[in-house]
Image (tube, rainbow, N blue to C red):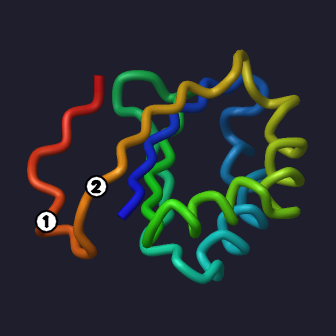
Amino acid sequence: MYFIVVKFQTKPDYTDQFMDLVTPFTEATRKEPGNLWFDWSRSVEDASEFVLVEAFLDDEAAGTHVNSAHFKAGLEAMRPALVATPKIVSRKVEGDSWGEMGELQIG
């Protein structure tokens, strides 16, 4: 399993519409072969920060995702809304189920 966490800091003028901007990207990614999980949450501490958590079956599925046309289109749609480059934290996890992940520390 390939598990990825990405933090997105949005500009104040875009915060309320950010989820609308990423909806096409989200829906297309969820349909990808090898996508196990793809969901957004909003930071409790900072309303302008969004966190994306995604999991793919393996390295190949994750690679297909980042090379897809909808990935590139999603980045272009998000770009005007972001304060800075998103912070990416990722970890490859051996196994094929969530129970095998063990404790995952994001630092």
Q: Position of residue 72 (x, y in %)?
A: 85, 51
Separation of disc 1 and disc 2 at Cα?
A: 8 Å
Residue appearing at x 47%, y 57% in the figure: 54
* Whether residue 12 can be seen here: no
Q: Residue furthest top?
A: 84
Between 103 and 9, which is closer to the camera in this rendering? Answer: 103
**Between disc 1 and disc 2, whose residue precedes?**
2
Q: Position of residue 98 (x, y in %)?
A: 21, 68
Which quarter of the picture shows residue 36? bottom left
Query: Which residue matches tag 2?
Result: 93
Q: Secondary structure at mark 1?
A: helix
Pointer 1 with pointer 2, Cβ within 8 A: yes
Between 11 and 53, which is closer to the camera in this rendering? Answer: 53
- Label 2 is placed on what type of residue? Val
The label number, if any, that marks residue 100 in the structure image? 1
Quadrant in which the C terminus is drawn: top left
- Label 1 is placed on what type of residue? Glu
